[in-house]
Amino acid sequence: MASAPRDKVILVTETPNGEHFNVMPAFWGTPEGFTEPDWWGTSFSLIGRGPLFDTPGLRSKLIAITPLCWRPVPSRASEPIIKRMRKQDGTL
């Protein structure tokens, strides 16, 4: 994680319980209400609008994480995922 950029959203892998691995978008920063910068992951649901991504039907939630490794977000990755999630939800 030492080589991870701290000025953009990246994909990280973390394992909160030591058994299951999660891959999620993450960023380095200090969200409102916190005093120290840290890594923050985002969890998504299909209800309302979220604080990070102003997309109708997609809500994000911040999660404090300890990432193990990282990769850049692939270009044009988010649009197909959002369309697929909306299609499954019937909002597309």
Image (cartoon, rainbow, N blue to C red):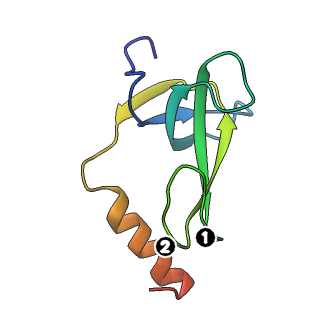
Vertically, is 9 above or below 75? above
**Left or right of 70, for residue 28:** right
Residue drawn at x 42%, y 74% as measured from the top left: 84
Q: Name the residue at 61% across, 70% down.
A: 46
Q: In which image quadrant can residue 62 be found?
A: top right
90 lies above or below 85? below
Q: Which residue is mark 1?
A: 46
Please tell me which of labels 1 and 2 falls first in the chain.
1
Task: For label 2, count other residues whose C-alpha is less than 10 Å away and answer few (under 14), some (14-19) or many (20+).
Answer: some
Q: Hey, what amino acid is under mark 2?
A: Met
Query: In screen coordinates, is 57 left or right of 73?
Result: right
Question: On the image, numbered disc 2 is attached to which residue?
Answer: 85
Residue 28 percent coordinates (x, y):
52, 25
Q: Looking at the image, which residue sits at the far front?
A: 32
Foreground of the two, 52 or 17: 52
Is there a contact, CB below 8 Å, between mark 1 and mark 2?
yes
Q: Residue at x 34, y 42 (%)?
A: 73
Q: Secondary structure at mark 2?
A: helix
Give 59 or 90, whichever is nearer the viewer: 59
